[in-house]
Image (cartoon, rainbow, N blue to C red):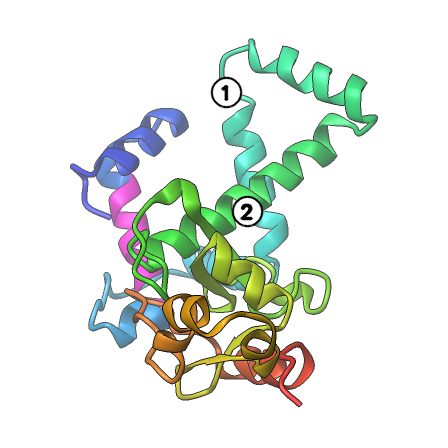
Amino acid sequence: MHTGTEEVQALALNMGRAANAVAMRLWNFASLDPESTQRGISGLGNVGRPCLAIWEEYTAHREEIIFESQMLWLHNMPEENDQEWKEVEEKLGIDKERWIKTRVNQSFFRQIVLSNYNFTCAVSGLQVPELLNASHIIPWATEPTMRLAPENGLCLSALYDRCFDRGLMTIDTNLMIRFSKHLAEQIPAEPYAHFFGKYEGQALNPPARYAPAPHALLYHNSSIFQNP
C-alpha cells in the first residue's frame, strides 16, 4: 500500500491521481478491514464518511464492484483486445460483457487465493504456478456471497484440486487433511502412500492472511466429502 509500490503507481497513473493520494486512501480502507486490523495494521485514523460508505458498499456487493472496477481498467487497455473479444463472441456465441465478467472473476479469485498461499500447494508444497489451482471450498453456485472470498479458497495442485472438488479429500475444522476411504480402496498401497497416505492427518500449509472459513469447511465436510 506504499507510494513506491509498483501496483499503487500503476493504479494512480490509470486514475490520473498522485501515487501518495492513492496510497493514503488504501491506508484509510485498511483501518476498516478486519483482516488488516487483526494483523496489527491500523491504517490511518479519522476515516471520513465517503471512505466508510465505499467500504460498506464493497463488502455488501463485492462481486459486482470487482467486475465494475475491472471493466473500467480493461477499457483503458490497448485496442487490440477488441479483436480477441470479437473472436470469442463469434466462436462461443457469448457476448463480450459476459465473457469479460467470467474472466475477471476467475482471474481475481485465482490471484488472491494463490497469493494468500504464497503460490504453494497447501497440501504438497508444490510451487509451480502452472500446476496450481484456486479451489472453492463452497462451490461457486452454492453460496454467491462467498464466490470471490479468499477465505473460501485453497491453493491446491491439480491432483489435490480434483480430489477436493470430487469429495475425495477434505480439510477438517482443525485444518487437518483428510482423504476418502474410496481412494485407499481403489489405489495400490505404494502409490497411495506416496501421493495420499503421507499427507493424511497432516496440517494444511498455512495461508499468509486469510484462513479458510470454518463454516465453509463444515459445508465441505458434510455435503461434499465422501467418507461413509
Residue at position x 34%, y 59% from top?
A: 116
Amino acid type assigned to the residue bearing label 1 in the image: Asn
- Examine the rendered structure and indicate whether residue 8 appears above or below residue 86: below
- Asked if the residue under mark 2 is in contact with the one under mark 1, i.e. CB atoms within 8 Å, the reply is no
- Examine the rendered structure and indicate whether residue 206 appears above or below residue 30: below
Of helix, strand and loop, which one carries label 2? helix
Where residue 71 appears, as percent x and y from the top left, is 58, 32
Q: Residues within 10 Å of mark 1 (few under 14, many from 20)?
A: few
Boundaries of the magenta span: 22-32
Q: Residues within 10 Å of mark 2 (few under 14, many from 20)?
A: some
In this picture, residue 162 sits left or right of residue 29: right
Of helix, strand and loop, which one carries label 1? loop
Q: Which residue is mark 1?
A: 76
Question: Which is more toward the observer, 145 or 161?
Answer: 161
- Examine the rendered structure and indicate whether residue 92 appears above or below residue 172: above
Where residue 25 appears, as percent x and y from the top left, is 32, 49
Which image quadrant is residue 147 in?
bottom right
Residue at position x 53%, y 63% from top?
A: 59
In this picture, residue 11 sits left or right of residue 92: left
Where residue 141 appears, as percent x and y from the top left, is 72, 62
N-terminal of the pair, mark 1 or mark 2, is 2
- Examine the rendered structure and indicate whether residue 22 appears above or below residue 209: above
Residue at position x 47%, y 49% from top?
A: 110
Amino acid type assigned to the residue bearing label 2 in the image: Ile
Q: Which residue is mark 2?
A: 66
Q: Quadrant of the C terminus?
A: bottom right
In this picture, residue 52 sits left or right of residue 117: right
Distance of label 1 from label 2 (alpha carbons): 16 Å
Question: Which is more toward the observer, 77 or 53?
Answer: 77
Residue 202 within the segment the image draws in magenta: no
Count of numbered marks: 2
Residue at position x 78%, y 28% from top?
A: 95
